[in-house]
Amino acid sequence: MSNPAAFIQACNEGRLWVHCDQCNDPKPLNRVERLDTIQNQSYWGPEPWWHDTHEFTCPDCGTVQKSLAQLQE
């Protein structure tokens, strides 16, 4: 998914998720409260959005977590 619009579309469709370590469960990226996106400084390729770390608050347990986004096909 080298197109940023496809990344946003997948997020809107609920196909992107992050992992909550406390719940040990995936959470849809569009369902969590995103606090920050941390850029991977060592990645210089064409798909930077796949290498960013998302800091979020889990809607179920309320903890603050950090995770890479994963795509559910």
Image (cartoon, helix red, strand yellow):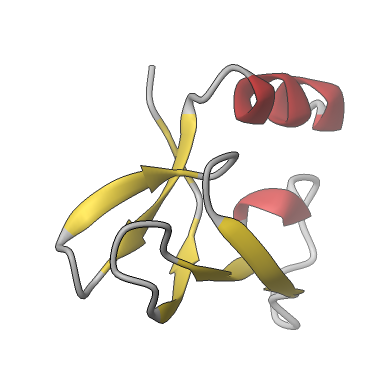
Above or below: residue 17 compared with residue 2: below
Above or below: residue 14 compared with residue 41: above
Left or right of 9, for residue 32: left
Residue 48 visible in this rendered orientation of the protein: yes
Residue 40, position as x, y percentages in the image: 69, 76
Q: Quadrant of residue 28?
A: top left
Residue 52 visible in this rendered orientation of the protein: no
Above or below: residue 63 compared with residue 17: below
Residue at the far left: name it.
24
Left or right of 56, for residue 21: left
Residue at the spot 54% in from the left edge and 44% down from the top edge: 29
Residue at the spot 44% in from the left edge and 42% down from the top edge: 17
Residue 13, position as x, y percentages in the image: 59, 17
Q: Quadrant of residue 44?
A: bottom right
Residue 33, position as x, y percentages in the image: 61, 60
Left or right of 30, for residue 36: right
